[in-house]
Amino acid sequence: MRVLLVEDNPGDAKLARYALAESSSDFDLHHETTLAAAISWLGQGLCDVILLDLGLPDSVGFETITKMRLAASSLPIIVLTGHDDPDFAVMALEAGAQDYLVKGDFTGGTLQRTLRYAIARKQMEERVRQAERQLRIIFSVAPEAILLADDNGRVTLANPAAETMFGLEGNRLLESNVSDLVPEIGLMLADAKDTQDGIRGEGCGHRAAENFHAAFSICPGIIEEPPSHLVLVQDVTDRKNAEEELRRLVVTDPLTGLSNRRRFEEACEIETMRFRRYGVPASLVMLDIDFFKRVNDTYGHATGDAVLVALAETCRRALRETDVAARLGGEEFAVLLPMTSETGALEIAERLRTRLAATSVQTPAGRLNFTVSLGVATFSGQDEAETVLARADAALYRAKEYGRNRVEVAEPPPIMSVIPD
């Protein structure tokens, strides 16, 4: 162990050297008599611990510790003093020393233990200080809002990201409650106190001019006194919007923006269950563009796509918000009409036929009109969704057979009779 002794009294220096030699041969002692000489030597030599007298020719009192600490911030300092006074010891430690020894009142073993303990404490302090530095950096640059809240939910500490996220600066944020920022956090804070692993959740974050979708974690009892709870908050609005857009794309026809077959079949299944449970009427309309192949062959597929888009837009304008219009494939479309009887479905189908007949698209040869044929079927008895769809499809083909540009109603389902044995 390399020890720097800073002592101007030859007798005290000799005692310290003797005590080290008596306790162990594992010490390499270097002696300086002034603070300036000691600091100069530290710039060139290697050292593990400093024994420092506070009454030097060029420095006296606790200021000596401060100066040495500035020159050797990473080295432990043990003060050599003639004062056996607890108050003096406390002030020495507050000034930056790790320990102190009273001159003439220590043995070699005491000195050795003090040196080793001082180094160990200094290393521990450095690890704590390094951890604190790292935490401060994380606290400052973390993109998530980091909050400390007391048992009542009052915010006691917040990082810069929290100020940005909630649109509140410094004191205004510290005057707030987590319930004001994300109400769901306030509701769950009491439950989080009773858990060891914490709680995660999502809710509505409040910002000055807007709300946002917040995901949060509550880690209870991060500080015991006063009781404080760590709250981490993320603004996940972009992620939620992306997820919602992905879900929409999965169930949407990319060309027309209407529902695709998958979404339409799911809606039909739900409506079938509602019909069976509550007897609420519902109907289906199948429609198909007349002579669509001729449009593609004559004007090209770009014009064909324009016709499909025009049909979809007309359906959106003509239908109710509760209706589900879908492109099942090619030029074949279907509409689910919840809470609609056969009479109502016929009226809607006829309205669609009329408006579509009046719809046109631009082609190189001028405006192009088109017509559709439609089939209507109403939910009945224990019909499955695909059965109703098949009956509407059969009605559609009858409309094609009877001249197109017309609406046909599906034949009623056959009545099942039970023949006795």
Image (tube, rainbow, N blue to C red):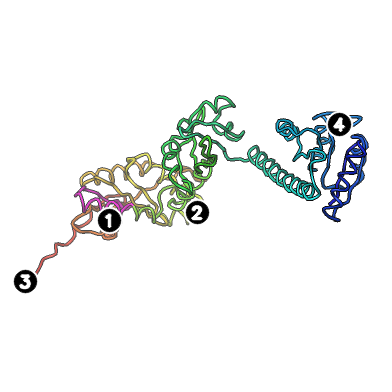
Instruction: Mark 2: give few (<14), some (14-19) or many (20+) Cα within 10 Å.
Output: few
The residue under label 3 is which amino acid type?
Pro
Name the residue tied to disc 4. Answer: 55
Secondary structure found at label 1 = helix
Q: Where is residue 301 in the image (x, y as percent from the top left)?
A: 50, 54
Q: Where is residue 276 in the image (x, y as percent from the top left)?
A: 21, 54
Name the residue tied to disc 1. Answer: 392
Which numbered disc, 3 or 4, marks the residue closer to the eye? 4
Q: Which of 340 and 301 is in front in this view?
A: 340
Q: Residue 290 carries which label?
A: none
Q: How far apart are marks 3 and 2 (CA)?
A: 58 Å
Q: Where is residue 194 in the image (x, y as percent from the top left)?
A: 43, 44
Q: How far apart are marks 3 and 1 (CA)?
A: 33 Å
Q: Do tag 4 and tag 2 residues touch (Cβ < 8 Å)?
A: no
The residue under label 1 is which amino acid type?
Ala
> In the image, which residues are magenta?
267-286
Q: Distance between the residues labelled 4 and 2?
A: 98 Å
